[in-house]
Image (spheres, helix red, strand yellow):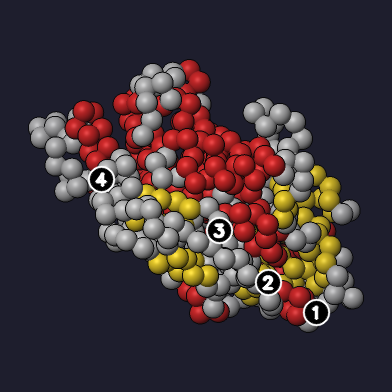
Amino acid sequence: MVARVHGGLLFALLSLSVQGTARIRLRQTPGLKVNVGNPGGGGGEVVSENLWGVVSAAQKTERSLPFSAHVMHLNDSTFDSEILQRKNTLMLTELYINWCPHCRQFTPKWSRLATLVGNVQGVWFAAIDCAESRTLCSSHRFKVNSVPTITAHIISESGDTSKVGENTGNVEYNGVREWVKTMLLASRINLQDQTLIERMMNDKGDPGLEVHIPPPNKPVHEHPLDLSYAVFESLLNGVFLGETSIAPCSENPTTCKDKRCALVSWMNTLSANLPGFDGLKGGLEYLKIHSHETISLEMWLGVLHNQTTIHKAPGGVVFPLGGAAKSKFDLCAGDMHGFPCGLWQVFHSLVSYATDQTAHFILQQIREYVERLFLCKSCQDHFASMASSLDDSPVTSRREGVLWLWKAHNNVTRRLAPIYKIPEEKVEFPSAEECPTCRDTLSGAWLDSELVAHLDAKYRYLGNS
């Protein structure tokens, strides 16, 4: 636990298959015309639909996490008007992303704390889904760099907000309760309910609430739409959350640790090693030409929407980055599947298409992406712990790389199994039903050769014709 003083207050930062012309509807910035070529040589057409990130209220409600009645869900359009109604108030806000498992695990705990405080005048619990309110989460008020994050703000008489505390990545109930108590005691808000602190002190331990979520899908093989959208999201999520623009690299792009340099490194890895994603070279060229300029989110969205991803699947299918507007994911569609499911497909595909010479490098690039551009702090920490083995025991073949990532994926599933309520027999993939030959029929031990063959069939179909 690291204690620091912020705005005069002491707070704890706890670590915690279509041939011919393809017509696809695509979300993009207004006025941006995108023409996608047919892999057979003819002209394809992409029709613009909506601004990126603009979804209906019903869609937002459906995708956002459920909180108790004592937590108000805010977004880009409601935030300013709501805070003007709550002057001289301590605002406690959870900032999350709807696909983040640790955010989902924390949701009932934040609701519990809000209910414990109740309708005390001068205290307000809120929540913001940063997947739907990117502008707000990137504003000066929050500047979110990982999730879940909780913040404390004082809303003044004039309606201005001043951040007085922040707690990043922690989902342990007792620690967060103590942080909230500290914020209440340190704030200059005149609490009307003098028994509130006593109630919080008498609240002993985690409520033990868990979110019942179906386990992620286990697709028979990857799907071009899922890969396309996962790549699209990977070039946005960790780059612009908490930022409205990205500055030029401060040093040599091959050695620097800036977000922009991490973005260039990840795009190089994708375009060079994943069939069908060489269209990203246009984006890389843009970054090179504008290497000394600051790039805004709107500018970068325009660049991405002009990138074409052509998957050489049977029949030839064109998928622009970002996929189809009406369905972001196919096999990875679902309330808690989405981006993490798609991203694992990207990771497995990269390693499956590797060579003996590039397998270790690609695993290190995946490691770097998670460390520098993935938003979940707990996920970063756990992946870093697993990937440290690569320093002592580098993989020396594509086969080893495929097996290393498979083991890592299963380790992550095992860690998240209590949240998803995944039974023990379904924790490790592939299941016996999905791959009857992957295990020894007598001992149940994994058979590496059969397993690699199964994973190749699942993740290497992109270049097939």
Which residue bears the numbered disc 1? Answer: 84
For label 2, the crowd category at 10 Å Cα-Cα, with few meaning under 14, some 14 to 19 and many 20 or more, is some
Residue 217 visible in the picture: yes
Is tag 1's residue or tag 4's residue first in the polypeptide sequence?
1
Percent x, y of residue 21 = 36, 63
Of the two numbered discs 2 and 3 in the rendering, the one whose residue sits closer to the viewer: 3
Q: Which mark is residue 456?
A: none
Q: Of helix, strand and loop, which one carries label 1?
A: helix
**Residue placed at 33% from the left, 47% from the top?**
312
Mark pair 2, 4: CA separation: 45 Å
**Residue placed at 17% from the left, 35% from the top?**
439
Is tag 2's residue or tag 3's residue first in the polypeptide sequence?
2
Q: Amino acid at mark 3?
A: His
**Residue placed at 46% from the left, 31% from the top?**
363
Percent x, y of residue 14 = 67, 46
Which residue bears the numbered disc 4? Answer: 465
Q: Of helix, strand and loop, which one carries label 4?
A: loop
Which residue bears the numbered disc 2? Answer: 76
- Look at the numbered discs 1 and 2 and tell me whether their residues touch, using CB distance below 8 Å: no
Vertical arrangement, residue 152 with respect to residue 352, above or below? below
Is tag 2's residue or tag 4's residue first in the polypeptide sequence?
2
Is tag 1's residue or tag 2's residue first in the polypeptide sequence?
2
Q: Amino acid at mark 1?
A: Leu
| Foreground pick, 307 / 389 | 307
| Foreground pick, 258 / 148 | 258
Q: Which mark is residue 305?
A: 3
